[in-house]
Image (tube, rainbow, N blue to C red):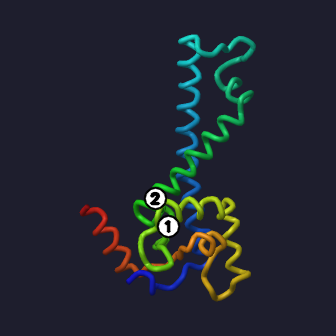
Amino acid sequence: MYSEAPRASLLRRLSAIMYDLLVICAIWMFAMALALAAVAVLAKTGVISLVGYQDEAEYIQKHAIWFQLYSSACIGWFYLYFWVKAGQTLGMRAWRLLLLSADGKPVTLRQAFIRLLTSLGGIGNFWLWLRWGKGLALQDQVAGTIVVVLTKEQSSALNLHRDAR
């Protein structure tokens, strides 16, 4: 049913990414607060020592690789969760975009993970210019997914149906 909808354009995809960046900023700030709290608790319990560090933030900066991995995992979780659970991130919902398997079924966790890795932080969407008329970004082509534009009626029906679960 939804798989016959028109494919999402580059502009529409980039607009959804801009919305999602706001959510990602909030997730990242929350992740930072949790990391600072974790370092403070570990220091208070004697698991780690803050000797030689000004504060918890400097400790995190000196061990940046771990926080970068943690931050990447939090952001990755955001996309994986929403793609698998609803087929839409919050930005995709605002722009009436829906992610599906190429056969029209919901996206699997494996497909979502492949899509996340091959999206190259959104740069994979520029593949649309190379594959003009196909409507497939690099991540969609590799993961076997499609992103379609829903009508207002389809979007309302889809979101009402999901809320009833």
Vertical position of residue 135 compared to residue 68: above or below: below
Q: Quadrant of the C terminus?
A: bottom left
Q: Which residue is mark 1?
A: 92
Query: Residue at (59%, 64%) from the top-left corner?
Result: 115
Vertical position of residue 66 compared to residue 2: above or below: above
Total numbered badges shown on the rendered structure: 2
* Residue 35, quarter of the rendered image: top right
Residue 82 has which mark?
2
Badge 2: residue crowd in 10 Å (few <14, some 14–19, many ≥20): some
* Residue 56, quarter of the rendered image: top right
Q: Are marks 2 and 1 in contact (CB under 8 Å)?
A: yes
Q: Quadrant of the N terminus?
A: bottom left
* Residue 64, quarter of the rendered image: top right
Query: Residue at (59%, 55%) from the top-left corner?
Result: 21
SS at mark 1 in the image: helix
Identify the mark nearer the N-term, 2 or 1: 2
**Residue type indicated by callout 1:** Met
**Residue type indicated by callout 2:** Phe
Query: Residue at (62%, 86%) from the top-left corner?
Result: 134
Residue 75 has which mark?
none
Vertical position of residue 147 compared to residue 62: above or below: below
Query: Residue at (60%, 79%) from the top-left corner?
Result: 9
Q: Position of residue 53 (x, y in %)?
A: 72, 17
Q: Position of residue 151 (x, y in %)?
A: 41, 81
Left or right of 81, for residue 163: left
Please identify, in this view, whether the residue under mark 2 or under mark 1 is nearer the observer.
2
Badge 1: residue crowd in 10 Å (few <14, some 14–19, many ≥20): many
Q: Position of residue 129 (x, y in %)?
A: 71, 81
| Residues at marks 2 and 1, CA–CA distance in whole angstroms | 10 Å
Left or right of 128, for residue 41: left
